[in-house]
Image (spheres, coloured by chain):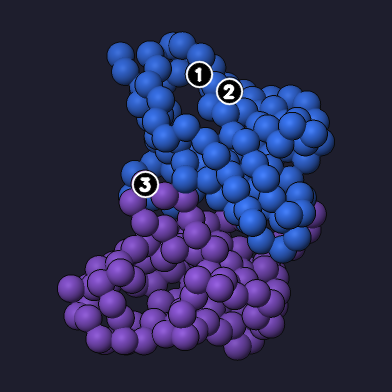
Chain colours: A purple, B blue
Amino acid sequence: DTGVSQDPRHKITKRGQNVTFRCDPISEHNRLYWYRQTLGQGPEFLTYFQNEAQLEKSRLLSDRFSAERPKGSFSTLEIQRTEQGDSAMYLCASSPGLAGETQYFGPGTRLLVL
Amino acid sequence: GQNIDQPTEMTATEGAIVQINCTYQTSGFNGLFWYQQHAGEAPTFLSYNVLDGLEEKGRFSSFLSRSKGYSYLLLKELQMKDSASYLCAVRGFNKFYFGSGTKLNVKP
């Protein structure tokens, strides 16, 4: 399977704990996006990488959120000192970066903060 | 700011045709995309428009009018498996802006 993969698929944590999610994009896709989605809403943009460079980060993203893509391949999203409001589906998507090309989404990581 | 509007929910009958509308106001436009999302799953790509007009792909068609900031997704010969949320998304300069999605209920 050469699609986008995410790990873990589900995460339950207690408020105040740190969590880290991983995304492996489709190989040779140079753009990678992170989104957050809550029930009944569309995906909300969090951040975006072109290769290893983080080019944009949502103003909605607090300092507790950080993302990396160290070698321009896989990416990690870390949430520090989790809050109950962080409970959501975290989606990763990748694209070749060409005009007109869609994004391909991974299966998501569902986070529940107790 | 960015604004993408689509109806929250629609209901249609198996075998019928349904049209899901989307209006948008975004800074920068590099295409309009439609995605299908079944409950608990990731969105999957359905169609893409960058020029005005109609794009047809089997039972699905999508229309775009850039001057009106308007698009629609047309689903023909509805099947029960088409029950899902349909997301309208606009690609800006570097990123995608999503609407809240239209939940389509297909009834027998």
Residues under labels 3 and 2: Cα distance? 21 Å
The amino acid on which the numbered mark 3 sits, given as a three-letter code, is: Gly
Which secondary structure, mark 1? strand
Q: How many numbered marks, from 0 up?
A: 3
- Mark 1 is surrounded, within 10 Å at the Cα level, by few (under 14), some (14 to 19) or many (20 or more) other residues, namely some
Q: CB of mark 3 within 8 Å of CB of mark 2?
A: no
Q: Chain of mark 1?
A: B
Q: CB of mark 3 within 8 Å of CB of mark 1?
A: no
Badge 1 or badge 2: first in the primary sequence: 1
Residue A36 at least partly seen: yes
Residues under labels 3 and 1: Cα distance? 20 Å
Residue at coordinates 66% horizontally, 61% vertically from top-left?
Answer: B95
Vertical placement of B69 versus B75: above or below?
Answer: below
- Mark 2 is surrounded, within 10 Å at the Cα level, by few (under 14), some (14 to 19) or many (20 or more) other residues, namely some
Q: Disc number at residue B18?
A: 1
- Mark 3 is surrounded, within 10 Å at the Cα level, by few (under 14), some (14 to 19) or many (20 or more) other residues, namely few
The amino acid on which the numbered mark 2 sits, given as a three-letter code, is: Leu
Residue at coordinates 58% horizontally, 67% vertically from top-left?
Answer: A33
The amino acid on which the numbered mark 1 sits, given as a three-letter code, is: Val
Q: CB of mark 1 within 8 Å of CB of mark 2?
A: yes
The residue wearing badge 2 is: B74
Left or right of A114: which side holds A83? Answer: right
The residue wearing badge 3 is: A40
